[in-house]
Image (cartoon, grey):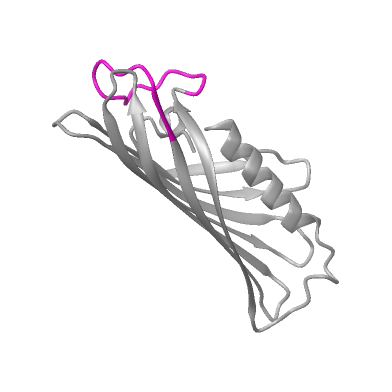
Amino acid sequence: MNLRRIAALVVIIAASVALPVSVIAPSASAQVTQERFSVPFTIPFGVPCADLPPEVTLVSGTAEFFLRSTTRVDSGGVTYLNINATAFGTATDNNGVVYSFNYANHFSIEVPPGGFPQQIRMSDHFNLNGKGKDAHMHIGFVIVGTIDGPGDFFPWHTDAINVRGDAFNCDPI
């Protein structure tokens, strides 16, 4: 899995876990934040990517992101954090071919009043589309898992529900 994604998720999860219970007071309403930002990427990003189109060794682009986070606490004190990220843009390969791409990630975590164990679920896909029958790449995964304590680091205790393509080595964002 991409180190940038891991780092971002660790920061988000650590921030949500680090909030004292007194700050996360039970509430009927949800708190929502939205962000827009750009992220440059390159495929491959340090490990071989088996799903690049034929004769393509490098693809570079910039993703235009929209990120929406929703936090809600139920009457039992369980915090629900949902992060939805979408991105789109264009990228160019080492042969000068231009592609369009789209990306979506949904990450959810349930944090009980005592902090642990936390239940996570992540659905992720990246689609790269160019002209021609072989000028594309469609990859993705769905994982579920548990974070047992503050020293439990990614990949936690996860199970892959579905994996499409070389998702953990080719997904650049």
Left or right relative to 1: residue 133: left
Q: Nearer the viewer, residue 148 or 9?
A: 9
Membership of 32 in magenta stretch? no
Say if residue 154 shows up in the picture. yes
Query: Is residue 14 placed above or below 140 in the rendered structure?
Result: below
Residue found 33% across the figure and 33% down from its top: 165
Q: Nearer the viewer, residue 35 or 49?
A: 35
Total residue callouts: 0
Residue found 26% across the figure and 26% down from its top: 97
Membership of 57 in magenta stretch? yes
Query: Is residue 150 placed above or below 16 in the rendered structure?
Result: above
Seen from this angle, which residue lies furthest front? 96
Seen from this angle, which residue lies furthest left? 133
Residue found 31% across the figure and 24% down from its top: 52
Residue 17 percent coordinates (x, y): 75, 56
Answer with the quarter of the image where residue 69 lies. bottom right
Residue 126 percent coordinates (x, y): 38, 41
Left or right relative to 77: residue 61: left
Query: Is residue 48 placed above or below 171 in the rendered structure?
Result: above
Left or right relative to 97: residue 117: right
Residue 118 percent coordinates (x, y): 67, 56
Prevalent SS, magenta region: loop
State which region is magenta: 45-61
Residue found 58% across the figure and 54% down from its top: 120
Residue 7 percent coordinates (x, y): 65, 38
